[in-house]
Image (cartoon, helix red, strand yellow):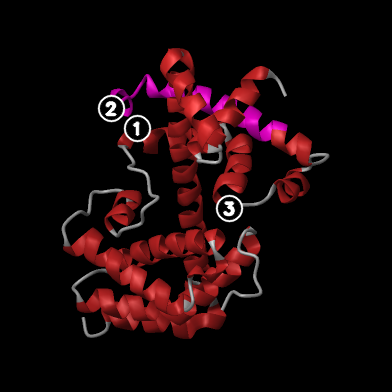
Amino acid sequence: MRTSLNEIREAEDYLMKKLPPEDSLLFEARLILNPLLYEKVEWQKKTYTIITLNARNEIKKEAARAFEKVFNNPEERGFKQKILNIFYKGR
Amino acid sequence: MGKSLNLKHERQREALFVELYKAVFPLTARYVKRQGGTLDEAKDVFQDALVIYYEKKVSNEEAVSNDKAYVFGTSKLLWIKKYREGIRDESSANSWQKLGEQDVPVVSVAHEKIAAFLATTGQKCMNLLKAFYYDKLNLEEIASSFGYSGIRSATVQKYKCMEKIRETVKEKSLHYEDFVE
């Protein structure tokens, strides 16, 4: 792998606490001495947050589709009726 | 429930979600209605509860001993946090954090905007990164799902995607002042 990708791997191992303690300390020293590396690691940290957020949005959309699938399925009419009764019966 | 399903794959996940809607959603709906909530609020918290449930299951299959009770309990707590305690304008992720999920990062509006941007423009890489970091597929499964020749090729691609998306996150963040702490 090229150097920049190895650096990403190393930063990932550091952020995910997969480095042995002595390597982790060494990496922290490099972060102090190398502002450019520090900046890259900070952006990488934010990228993991964005990946998680994006993935959650995807799973939530899947969950919404699953609801529509049950709610609009003619074979599951009982489910739809039950839900509508809970919210709208007696209005 | 769900023991024989591999939740890491969308079709099987959908089958389980459908099963959980049928078994548990009426209970959540009744609870939300009794508390003065609406059908849309019940749907919202139930969807969030399914996301939390999914994350628990992929992290550790044994973490949830009773799937139905877990989803019902989580949706109840989420409704209290999100709606009764008057934090309706907050994103789901921040409500989850208040629920005590330790590993939920604080999410800003800028994060939401960048995630929405990447969902449309960086989809291929985002799918691969999601598969590895969120769905917890191993590199062998990723190579097979995404058509790479092997683990090594999938590994290199994963880091290339990380490099690309990291650059986009940095570039886009310049448009959103509040993203830089």
User: Within 10 angstroms of label 3, few (less than 14), some, or many (20 or more) residues?
Assistant: many
Same chain for the residues under marks 3 and 1 in the image: yes
Local packing at callout 1 (Cα closer than 10 Å; few below 14, some 14-19, many 20+) is some
What chain does badge 1 belong to? Answer: B
Residue shown at the point (65%, 70%) measured from the top left: B5
By secondary structure, the bulk of the magenta-drawn segment is best described as: helix
- Which numbered disc, 3 or 1, marks the residue closer to the eye? 3
Whether residue B120 is visible, yes or no, is no
B164 within the magenta span: yes
> Looking at the image, how many numbered discs can be counted on the residues?
3
The residue marked by circle 2 belongs to what chain? B
For residue A88, side relative to residue A63 (left or right)? left
Residue assigned mark 3: B135
Mark sitting earlier along the chain (3/1): 1
Q: Is residue B61 above or below residue A8?
A: below
Residue B179 in view here: yes
Residue occupied by mark 1: B110
| B56 drawn magenta | no
- In the image, what residue occupies the spot 60% across and 70% down? B15
Whether pointer 1 and pointer 2 mark residues with C-beta atoms closer than 8 Å, the reply is yes
The percent coordinates of residue B114 (x first, y second) are 43, 32
Q: Quadrant of residue B75?
A: bottom left
Residue B65, x across and y down, in percent: 49, 77
Which residue position is annotated with label 2? B178
Determine if marks 1 and 2 fall on one subunit: yes
**Residue interval drawn in magenta:** B156-181
Q: Earlier in the sequence, mark 1 or mark 2?
A: 1
Callout 3: helix, strand or loop? loop
Distance from disc 3 to disc 2, alpha carbons, whole Å, reads 29 Å
Q: CA distance from mark 1 to mark 2?
A: 7 Å
- The residue lying at 59 percent from left, 74 percent from top is B2
